[in-house]
Amino acid sequence: MAPPPNVRALRTFDVASALAPTNIAVIKYWGKDAARGGNTPINSSASLTLDPADLRAETVMVASPELPADELWLNGEKVDVAGDHTHAKRLRRCLATMRRRCARTRRPPPSSKARTGEELSKWGVRVVSRNTFPTAAGLASSAAGYAALVKCAAHLYGVADGPGFSLSATAREGSGSACRSLDGGLVAWRKGARADRSDSKADQFFDERHWPELRVLVLVASAAEKETPSTEGMQRSVATSPFLAHRAAAVAEPRVEALRAAFKARDFRAFGELCMRDSNSFHATCLDTCLAGRGPVALDARDPPRQNGRRLRGVCRLRGASPRRASDGLCLGNA
Protein backbone atom coordinates (compact mmCIF):
# COMPACT_ATOMS: atom_id res chain seq x y z
CA MET A 1 0.00 0.00 0.00
CA ALA A 2 1.37 3.44 -0.93
CA PRO A 3 2.07 5.80 2.00
CA PRO A 4 -0.17 8.85 2.37
CA PRO A 5 1.10 12.03 0.66
CA ASN A 6 3.04 14.74 2.47
CA VAL A 7 3.42 13.02 5.83
CA ARG A 8 6.43 13.43 8.05
CA ALA A 9 8.84 10.49 8.15
CA LEU A 10 9.24 8.83 11.53
CA ARG A 11 12.48 7.62 13.10
CA THR A 12 11.11 5.48 15.95
CA PHE A 13 8.02 3.44 15.30
CA ASP A 14 6.25 0.07 15.46
CA VAL A 15 4.20 -1.13 12.51
CA ALA A 16 1.61 -3.81 11.83
CA SER A 17 -0.65 -4.65 8.90
CA ALA A 18 -3.83 -6.66 8.40
CA LEU A 19 -6.65 -7.23 5.96
CA ALA A 20 -10.25 -8.22 6.52
CA PRO A 21 -13.02 -9.24 4.12
CA THR A 22 -16.46 -7.75 3.89
CA ASN A 23 -19.58 -9.79 4.61
CA ILE A 24 -23.10 -9.99 3.21
CA ALA A 25 -25.89 -10.30 5.76
CA VAL A 26 -28.35 -13.11 5.10
CA ILE A 27 -30.32 -12.58 8.32
CA LYS A 28 -30.15 -8.83 8.84
CA TYR A 29 -29.98 -6.70 11.93
CA TRP A 30 -31.66 -3.32 11.89
CA GLY A 31 -31.83 -1.11 14.94
CA LYS A 32 -29.56 -0.49 17.93
CA ASP A 33 -30.35 -1.30 21.54
CA ALA A 34 -30.22 2.18 23.06
CA ALA A 35 -30.69 0.88 26.62
CA ARG A 36 -27.52 -1.25 26.49
CA GLY A 37 -25.50 1.05 24.20
CA GLY A 38 -22.10 0.01 22.88
CA ASN A 39 -23.38 -0.52 19.34
CA THR A 40 -25.46 -3.54 20.35
CA PRO A 41 -28.35 -4.69 18.11
CA ILE A 42 -32.01 -5.36 18.83
CA ASN A 43 -31.80 -8.71 17.04
CA SER A 44 -29.16 -11.30 16.21
CA SER A 45 -28.00 -11.62 12.62
CA ALA A 46 -25.97 -13.88 10.34
CA SER A 47 -23.76 -13.29 7.32
CA LEU A 48 -21.58 -14.91 4.71
CA THR A 49 -17.98 -13.72 4.76
CA LEU A 50 -16.79 -12.98 1.23
CA ASP A 51 -13.48 -13.99 -0.28
CA PRO A 52 -10.78 -11.51 0.82
CA ALA A 53 -9.08 -12.02 -2.53
CA ASP A 54 -11.96 -10.03 -4.06
CA LEU A 55 -13.48 -7.66 -1.48
CA ARG A 56 -11.38 -6.55 1.48
CA ALA A 57 -10.05 -3.69 3.57
CA GLU A 58 -6.27 -3.37 3.86
CA THR A 59 -4.87 -1.53 6.87
CA VAL A 60 -1.42 -0.51 8.06
CA MET A 61 -1.00 0.96 11.54
CA VAL A 62 2.11 2.77 12.73
CA ALA A 63 2.66 3.72 16.39
CA SER A 64 5.32 6.27 17.27
CA PRO A 65 6.27 8.58 20.15
CA GLU A 66 6.82 11.22 17.46
CA LEU A 67 3.12 11.36 16.55
CA PRO A 68 1.43 14.04 18.69
CA ALA A 69 -2.07 12.86 17.72
CA ASP A 70 -3.76 9.92 16.04
CA GLU A 71 -4.19 10.07 12.26
CA LEU A 72 -6.47 8.20 9.84
CA TRP A 73 -6.03 8.05 6.07
CA LEU A 74 -8.84 6.31 4.19
CA ASN A 75 -8.51 5.60 0.47
CA GLY A 76 -5.82 8.29 0.21
CA GLU A 77 -7.78 11.01 2.04
CA LYS A 78 -7.10 12.25 5.56
CA VAL A 79 -10.08 11.82 7.90
CA ASP A 80 -10.75 13.97 10.97
CA VAL A 81 -10.51 11.64 13.98
CA ALA A 82 -10.79 14.37 16.61
CA GLY A 83 -14.28 15.49 15.60
CA ASP A 84 -17.70 14.68 16.96
CA HIS A 85 -19.02 12.64 14.04
CA THR A 86 -20.04 9.02 14.57
CA HIS A 87 -17.06 7.20 13.07
CA ALA A 88 -14.50 9.49 14.71
CA LYS A 89 -15.97 8.62 18.10
CA ARG A 90 -16.12 4.91 17.27
CA LEU A 91 -12.53 4.87 16.04
CA ARG A 92 -11.37 6.52 19.26
CA ARG A 93 -13.40 4.00 21.27
CA CYS A 94 -11.81 1.01 19.51
CA LEU A 95 -8.29 2.41 19.90
CA ALA A 96 -8.92 3.23 23.56
CA THR A 97 -10.09 -0.34 24.24
CA MET A 98 -7.01 -1.84 22.57
CA ARG A 99 -4.68 0.60 24.32
CA ARG A 100 -6.10 -0.23 27.75
CA ARG A 101 -5.52 -3.91 27.05
CA CYS A 102 -1.96 -3.19 25.88
CA ALA A 103 -1.19 -1.08 28.97
CA ARG A 104 -2.05 -4.03 31.22
CA THR A 105 0.61 -6.25 29.66
CA ARG A 106 4.04 -6.33 31.24
CA ARG A 107 5.86 -6.38 27.97
CA PRO A 108 5.04 -5.15 24.48
CA PRO A 109 5.50 -7.47 21.46
CA PRO A 110 9.14 -8.60 21.03
CA SER A 111 9.63 -6.41 17.94
CA SER A 112 8.41 -3.24 19.68
CA LYS A 113 10.66 -0.24 20.23
CA ALA A 114 8.73 0.58 23.40
CA ARG A 115 10.03 -0.66 26.75
CA THR A 116 6.63 -1.47 28.27
CA GLY A 117 3.07 -2.05 27.14
CA GLU A 118 2.04 1.10 28.99
CA GLU A 119 4.58 3.18 27.05
CA LEU A 120 3.43 1.73 23.73
CA SER A 121 -0.21 2.44 24.57
CA LYS A 122 0.61 6.15 24.89
CA TRP A 123 2.19 6.51 21.46
CA GLY A 124 0.19 8.20 18.72
CA VAL A 125 -0.88 6.06 15.77
CA ARG A 126 -1.15 6.63 12.04
CA VAL A 127 -3.75 4.37 10.42
CA VAL A 128 -3.68 4.00 6.64
CA SER A 129 -6.53 1.98 5.15
CA ARG A 130 -8.05 1.33 1.77
CA ASN A 131 -10.93 -0.71 0.40
CA THR A 132 -10.84 -2.74 -2.79
CA PHE A 133 -14.54 -2.01 -3.37
CA PRO A 134 -16.85 1.06 -3.18
CA THR A 135 -16.97 2.71 0.24
CA ALA A 136 -20.30 3.43 2.01
CA ALA A 137 -22.22 2.01 -0.96
CA GLY A 138 -23.93 -0.87 0.85
CA LEU A 139 -21.14 -3.48 0.71
CA ALA A 140 -20.25 -3.32 4.42
CA SER A 141 -17.09 -1.26 3.95
CA SER A 142 -17.19 -0.19 7.61
CA ALA A 143 -17.41 -3.87 8.67
CA ALA A 144 -14.28 -4.75 6.73
CA GLY A 145 -12.54 -1.55 7.81
CA TYR A 146 -13.09 -1.93 11.54
CA ALA A 147 -12.34 -5.66 11.45
CA ALA A 148 -9.01 -4.88 9.74
CA LEU A 149 -8.35 -2.07 12.24
CA VAL A 150 -8.89 -4.34 15.26
CA LYS A 151 -6.79 -7.15 13.76
CA CYS A 152 -4.04 -4.64 13.00
CA ALA A 153 -4.15 -3.17 16.53
CA ALA A 154 -4.08 -6.68 18.00
CA HIS A 155 -0.80 -7.37 16.16
CA LEU A 156 0.64 -3.96 17.00
CA TYR A 157 -0.19 -4.11 20.73
CA GLY A 158 0.20 -7.86 21.25
CA VAL A 159 -3.44 -8.25 22.28
CA ALA A 160 -5.49 -11.46 21.92
CA ASP A 161 -8.83 -12.92 22.98
CA GLY A 162 -8.89 -13.93 26.62
CA PRO A 163 -11.00 -14.04 29.78
CA GLY A 164 -13.12 -10.92 29.87
CA PHE A 165 -11.86 -9.63 26.52
CA SER A 166 -12.98 -10.23 22.94
CA LEU A 167 -11.60 -8.83 19.69
CA SER A 168 -15.03 -9.49 18.17
CA ALA A 169 -16.77 -7.31 20.77
CA THR A 170 -14.15 -4.61 20.25
CA ALA A 171 -14.74 -4.61 16.49
CA ARG A 172 -18.48 -4.33 17.21
CA GLU A 173 -17.84 -1.04 19.00
CA GLY A 174 -16.61 0.41 15.70
CA SER A 175 -19.15 -1.10 13.34
CA GLY A 176 -21.68 -3.67 14.48
CA SER A 177 -21.27 -6.01 11.54
CA ALA A 178 -17.46 -5.77 11.80
CA CYS A 179 -17.56 -8.50 14.44
CA ARG A 180 -18.78 -10.90 11.70
CA SER A 181 -15.79 -10.10 9.42
CA LEU A 182 -13.18 -11.57 11.75
CA ASP A 183 -14.16 -15.13 10.74
CA GLY A 184 -14.91 -16.85 7.44
CA GLY A 185 -17.93 -18.87 6.37
CA LEU A 186 -21.34 -18.44 8.01
CA VAL A 187 -21.04 -16.19 11.04
CA ALA A 188 -23.71 -15.02 13.48
CA TRP A 189 -23.66 -11.89 15.58
CA ARG A 190 -25.41 -12.74 18.83
CA LYS A 191 -27.27 -9.77 20.26
CA GLY A 192 -26.57 -11.00 23.80
CA ALA A 193 -28.31 -9.91 26.99
CA ARG A 194 -25.64 -8.99 29.55
CA ALA A 195 -25.54 -5.43 30.83
CA ASP A 196 -21.77 -5.24 30.18
CA ARG A 197 -22.40 -6.21 26.51
CA SER A 198 -19.63 -8.83 26.61
CA ASP A 199 -21.91 -11.46 25.01
CA SER A 200 -22.79 -9.26 22.01
CA LYS A 201 -20.21 -10.74 19.67
CA ALA A 202 -19.64 -13.07 16.73
CA ASP A 203 -20.28 -16.82 16.71
CA GLN A 204 -18.82 -18.71 13.74
CA PHE A 205 -21.32 -21.40 12.74
CA PHE A 206 -19.31 -22.94 9.87
CA ASP A 207 -16.04 -21.98 8.27
CA GLU A 208 -15.53 -21.36 4.56
CA ARG A 209 -14.74 -25.02 3.86
CA HIS A 210 -18.17 -26.31 4.85
CA TRP A 211 -20.01 -25.41 1.62
CA PRO A 212 -17.33 -24.78 -1.04
CA GLU A 213 -19.83 -24.91 -3.94
CA LEU A 214 -21.73 -21.88 -2.64
CA ARG A 215 -21.00 -18.69 -4.60
CA VAL A 216 -21.86 -15.04 -4.01
CA LEU A 217 -22.44 -12.82 -7.03
CA VAL A 218 -22.12 -9.11 -6.22
CA LEU A 219 -23.93 -6.70 -8.54
CA VAL A 220 -22.91 -3.09 -7.90
CA ALA A 221 -25.89 -1.01 -9.03
CA SER A 222 -24.15 2.19 -7.93
CA ALA A 223 -20.73 2.98 -6.46
CA ALA A 224 -22.06 6.23 -4.96
CA GLU A 225 -22.41 6.63 -1.21
CA LYS A 226 -25.79 5.68 0.24
CA GLU A 227 -28.27 8.53 0.43
CA THR A 228 -29.16 7.53 3.99
CA PRO A 229 -26.30 6.16 6.17
CA SER A 230 -27.15 2.95 8.00
CA THR A 231 -26.95 4.49 11.47
CA GLU A 232 -29.37 7.26 10.52
CA GLY A 233 -31.72 4.80 8.84
CA MET A 234 -31.78 2.57 11.91
CA GLN A 235 -32.49 5.52 14.19
CA ARG A 236 -35.41 6.55 11.98
CA SER A 237 -36.79 3.01 11.94
CA VAL A 238 -36.61 2.74 15.72
CA ALA A 239 -38.42 6.07 16.03
CA THR A 240 -41.11 5.59 13.36
CA SER A 241 -41.63 1.92 12.38
CA PRO A 242 -44.12 -0.10 14.49
CA PHE A 243 -43.12 -3.19 12.48
CA LEU A 244 -39.46 -3.05 13.58
CA ALA A 245 -39.85 -4.50 17.07
CA HIS A 246 -42.05 -7.34 15.78
CA ARG A 247 -39.53 -8.20 13.07
CA ALA A 248 -36.62 -8.24 15.54
CA ALA A 249 -38.27 -10.51 18.12
CA ALA A 250 -40.66 -12.73 16.16
CA VAL A 251 -39.17 -12.85 12.67
CA ALA A 252 -35.41 -12.31 12.52
CA GLU A 253 -34.32 -13.86 15.81
CA PRO A 254 -35.84 -17.36 15.23
CA ARG A 255 -34.53 -17.44 11.67
CA VAL A 256 -30.89 -17.43 12.74
CA GLU A 257 -31.07 -21.02 14.01
CA ALA A 258 -33.24 -22.12 11.07
CA LEU A 259 -30.64 -20.71 8.71
CA ARG A 260 -27.89 -22.51 10.60
CA ALA A 261 -29.68 -25.83 10.08
CA ALA A 262 -30.21 -25.20 6.35
CA PHE A 263 -26.55 -24.25 5.91
CA LYS A 264 -25.38 -27.31 7.82
CA ALA A 265 -27.44 -29.52 5.49
CA ARG A 266 -26.26 -27.54 2.43
CA ASP A 267 -29.92 -27.19 1.52
CA PHE A 268 -29.89 -24.25 -0.87
CA ARG A 269 -33.66 -24.21 -1.37
CA ALA A 270 -34.32 -23.87 2.36
CA PHE A 271 -31.37 -21.50 2.77
CA GLY A 272 -32.54 -19.34 -0.13
CA GLU A 273 -36.13 -19.14 1.05
CA LEU A 274 -35.06 -18.05 4.54
CA CYS A 275 -32.70 -15.42 3.13
CA MET A 276 -35.27 -13.97 0.75
CA ARG A 277 -38.05 -13.95 3.34
CA ASP A 278 -35.78 -12.13 5.75
CA SER A 279 -34.65 -9.68 3.07
CA ASN A 280 -38.28 -8.94 2.24
CA SER A 281 -39.15 -8.37 5.91
CA PHE A 282 -36.17 -6.04 6.21
CA HIS A 283 -37.32 -4.04 3.19
CA ALA A 284 -40.84 -3.97 4.66
CA THR A 285 -39.36 -2.31 7.74
CA CYS A 286 -37.64 0.26 5.53
CA LEU A 287 -40.92 0.89 3.73
CA ASP A 288 -42.55 1.40 7.13
CA THR A 289 -39.92 3.96 8.13
CA CYS A 290 -40.47 7.69 7.81
CA LEU A 291 -37.34 9.58 6.81
CA ALA A 292 -36.94 13.07 8.21
CA GLY A 293 -38.92 15.57 6.17
CA ARG A 294 -39.89 13.02 3.52
CA GLY A 295 -42.50 10.73 5.05
CA PRO A 296 -42.57 6.98 4.35
CA VAL A 297 -40.13 5.52 1.84
CA ALA A 298 -41.53 4.55 -1.56
CA LEU A 299 -39.98 2.00 -3.91
CA ASP A 300 -40.81 1.18 -7.50
CA ALA A 301 -39.76 -1.39 -10.07
CA ARG A 302 -36.84 0.75 -11.20
CA ASP A 303 -35.07 0.49 -7.84
CA PRO A 304 -31.76 -1.46 -7.78
CA PRO A 305 -33.04 -4.47 -5.74
CA ARG A 306 -35.76 -5.12 -8.31
CA GLN A 307 -33.40 -4.46 -11.22
CA ASN A 308 -30.88 -6.89 -9.76
CA GLY A 309 -33.63 -9.47 -9.20
CA ARG A 310 -34.46 -9.37 -12.90
CA ARG A 311 -30.77 -9.59 -13.82
CA LEU A 312 -30.33 -12.57 -11.52
CA ARG A 313 -33.25 -14.38 -13.14
CA GLY A 314 -31.56 -13.74 -16.50
CA VAL A 315 -28.33 -15.29 -15.22
CA CYS A 316 -30.28 -18.33 -14.02
CA ARG A 317 -31.81 -18.77 -17.49
CA LEU A 318 -28.40 -18.51 -19.16
CA ARG A 319 -27.16 -21.29 -16.90
CA GLY A 320 -30.15 -23.46 -17.67
CA ALA A 321 -31.75 -23.09 -14.23
CA SER A 322 -35.38 -22.35 -13.57
CA PRO A 323 -35.66 -18.91 -11.94
CA ARG A 324 -39.26 -19.37 -10.84
CA ARG A 325 -38.54 -19.71 -7.13
CA ALA A 326 -36.75 -17.38 -4.72
CA SER A 327 -34.39 -20.22 -3.84
CA ASP A 328 -33.02 -20.43 -7.40
CA GLY A 329 -30.99 -17.32 -6.57
CA LEU A 330 -30.84 -14.63 -3.92
CA CYS A 331 -31.05 -10.87 -4.31
CA LEU A 332 -30.06 -9.24 -1.02
CA GLY A 333 -29.14 -5.86 0.36
CA ASN A 334 -26.90 -5.67 3.42
CA ALA A 335 -27.01 -4.82 7.13
Image: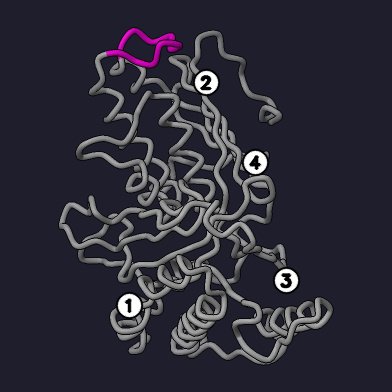
Q: Amino acid at mark 3?
A: Ala
Q: Amino acid at mark 1?
A: Pro
Crowd rating for badge 2 (residues with CA inside 10 Å; few <14, some 14–19, many 20+): some
Q: Is residue 291 above or below residue 84?
A: below
- Marks 3 and 2: CB-CB under 8 Å? no
How far across and down, in percent of the image, does residue 142 sit?
A: 52, 53
How far across and down, in percent of the image, does residue 252 sit?
A: 37, 78
Q: Residue furthest right?
A: 318
Question: Which image quadrant is residue 237 in?
Answer: bottom left
How far across and down, in percent of the image, does residue 190 sit?
A: 31, 61
Question: Which image quadrant is residue 247 in?
Answer: bottom left
Q: In front: mark 4 or mark 2?
A: 2
The quarter in which the N terminus is drawn is: top right
Query: First in sequence: mark 1 or mark 3?
Result: 3
Residue toward you, 316 or 127: 316
Q: Kindly identify which residue carries mark 3.
A: 221
Q: Kindly identify which residue carries mark 2.
A: 15
Colour theme: one colour
Q: Disc 2 versus disc 1: distance between alpha carbons? A: 43 Å
Mark 4 secondary-structure assignment:
strand
